[in-house]
Every structure is written in structure tokens, then in C-alpha cells.
């Protein structure tokens, strides 16, 4: 459960979106002011995450080259107030009638990925893998609880995660690299200055999907619990819901250039 945050991760430009139709497909893009030689597509935007259309905007969707390895990171920084502020992350679950709610103030994940095209169906999609670390993790409810992982309190690192957009239409699917029945992350909820009613070892398993809004991927408690694929303890355990926003930034692996926000957009395909 303490995972509200531990999942959004890699579903970004380089580990996510696709489209199942042959005549329409999504392609990964960076949101940037086009430089010489960039292939810009679609309308113009006024913001650095390509969410606000504007005829006078200077930001555009710039296509990510297929079959090129990218490196990047995901973060909750710049996900609200017009990309000026970070948003908090929450995880909720009810276990043995006890409501549990965790909060994290920071999220940072690193990974690698690639944009490609299925030669048979023509589907464009991205895939990638990496880990994320959540910081400032506290237990909102119940009282007298704290989150511990190894020797660290208030910090949780995920296992190796993989993201793919193949067969997911405009969404991206994220799950543990070792399989959906294994852990996104394992940690402990422990007593903190009193008796914690939810004290126990925690394991979050399953998978989760997210759909981008520009360069930001947003998850809601209602949406993630409705999916029913993220669980507490085991694949048949209580449902886990998450509330968070993350954005991914990337660049060609090994390059010295800046990182740019990434996402996906629908384009015509042959």
C-alpha cells in the first residue's frame, strides 16, 4: 500500500503509450522549442509540458526517433501550478478493516527506454525499465505509524520495473520486471511513538495503467482502484489506490544534451 507513489514511474515518453489501430498510432515525443533539424508535429503550445494549445506558443511536439535508446527520469517536480510546483503522492488501501493512507513528498526514478514500431501491426509504442525512490514518506493514517525500508525511515525504493505501451492503446502499463505477481516494493509499517494499528510488513504487487496529459501522467484513487490490478500483499489481496502526478524527461542515451519532457501523441501511420 505504501506504494501510492511507487508505481507511476516509467510510464513516460520512453516507457509507455501506444495505439492498437494500424491507421493511427502514437509516437513518443519531447515537448520543446524546436531546434534546427527537429521534426515538429501538430499544434503549438504555450507551456513546457505541451498541455495548453496556443497559436502563438513556442513549444511543439518533436518526434522521438524510433529504435534509438533513451535515458531519462520521472519526477513529481513541476506537476502542478503550471509546472512550477511539485505535487504530493498518496497511496490508500483498507486492510483487515483498517484504512491506511501513505503520503510522499518526493519521487525520482531513472531508467532507459526505446520507441519502436511493430512490423506486423504497424503499432507505435515505447518500452523501458528502471527504479524509483520515494522520499518524505509518512503515514497519514492510522496514527503512531512510520514507514521503514531497511535502515531508512521515510524512504522507499521500488524493485526494477518495466513499462510498455504495446497493446495498451493510449495508456501505458507498468509492472515489476519479475512479473505482475511479484513486488513493486516491499517495506514495513512500524510503531512510531505509540501502537500502530497497521504495523506489518508490506508488499505491493500487480500492475497499473496511466494515460498522459501532455508530459504529465496523472493517477487518481478512483481510477486505479477501478482497474483492480494493484494489490496489497498478493495478487488477490485488497485493492490499492494511488493519487499522484509524474512527468518524464529524457534524452538520447550517452548524449550531453539537456533532458526534455516527454509523452505521446497520435499520428497517422502508413
Image (tube, rainbow, N blue to C red):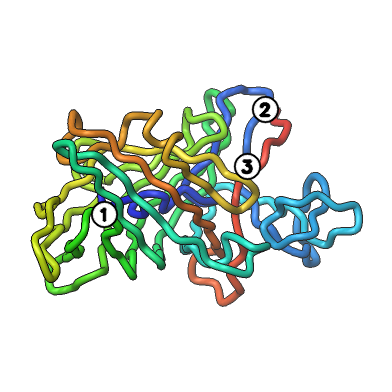
Image-based side of 92 in relation to 236, left or right: right
Callout 2: 10 Å neighbours few (<14), some, many (20+)?
A: some
Callout 1: 10 Å neighbours few (<14), some, many (20+)?
A: some
Q: Quadrant of residue 80?
A: bottom right
Marker disc for residue 27: 3
**What residue occupies the far bottom of the structure in this picture?**
256
Labels 1 and 3 touching (C-beta < 8 A): no
Identify the residue position indicated by label 1 in the image: 141
The answer to whether any part of residue 153 appears in the image is yes
**How many discs mark residues in the rendered view?**
3
Viewer-side residue, 262 vs 208: 208
Image-based side of 260 in relation to 194, left or right: right
Residue at image location 37% in from the left, 54% down from the top: 5
Under circle 2, the secondary element is strand
Residue at image location 12% in from the left, 71% down from the top: 193
Marker disc for residue 24: 2
In the rendered image, residue 184, in percent from the top left (x then y), is placed at 25, 48
Amino acid at each position: 500500500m505504501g506504494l501510492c507513489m511507487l508505481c507511476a514511474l516509467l510510464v513516460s515518453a520512453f516507457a509507455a503509450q501506444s495505439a492498437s489501430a494500424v491507421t493511427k498510432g502514437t509516437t513518443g515525443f519531447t515537448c520543446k522549442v524546436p531546434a534546427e533539424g527537429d521534426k515538429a508535429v501538430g499544434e503549438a503550445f504555450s507551456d513546457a509540458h505541451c498541455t495548453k494549445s496556443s497559436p502563438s506558443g513556442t513549444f511543439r511536439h518533436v518526434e522521438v526517433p524510433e529504435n534509438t535508446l533513451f535515458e531519462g527520469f520521472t519526477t513529481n517536480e513541476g506537476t502542478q501550478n503550471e509546472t512550477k510546483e511539485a505535487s504530493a503522492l498518496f497511496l490508500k488501501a483498507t486492510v483487515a478493516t483498517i484504512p491506511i493512507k501513505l503520503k510522499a513528498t518526493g519521487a525520482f526514478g531513472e531508467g532507459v527506454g526505446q520507441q519502436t514500431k511493430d512490423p506486423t501491426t504497424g503499432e507505435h509504442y515505447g518500452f523501458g525499465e528502471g527504479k524509483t525512490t520515494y522520499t518524505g514518506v509518512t503515514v497519514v493514517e492510522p496514527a503512531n505509524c512510520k514507514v521503514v525500508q531497511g535502515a531508512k525511515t521515510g524512504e522507499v525504493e521500488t524493485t526494477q520495473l518495466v513499462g510498455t505501451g504495446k497493446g495498451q492503446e493510449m495508456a501505458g502499463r507498468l509492472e515489476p520486471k519479475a512479473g505482475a505477481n511479484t513486488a513493486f516494493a516491499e517495506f514495513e509499517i512500524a510503531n512510531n511513538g505509540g501502537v500502530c494499528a497497521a504495523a506489518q510488513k508490506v508488499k505491493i504487487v500487480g500492475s497499473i495503467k496511466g494515460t498522459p496529459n501532455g508530459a504529465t501522467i496523472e493517477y487518481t484513487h478512483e481510477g486505479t482502484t477501478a482497474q483492480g490490478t494493484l494489490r496489497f500483499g498478493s495478487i488477490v489481496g485488497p485493492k490499492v489506490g494511488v493519487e499522484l502526478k509524474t512527468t518524464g524527461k529524457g534524452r538520447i542515451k550517452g548524449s550531453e544534451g539537456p533532458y526534455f519532457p516527454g509523452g505521446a501523441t497520435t499520428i497517422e501511420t502508413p
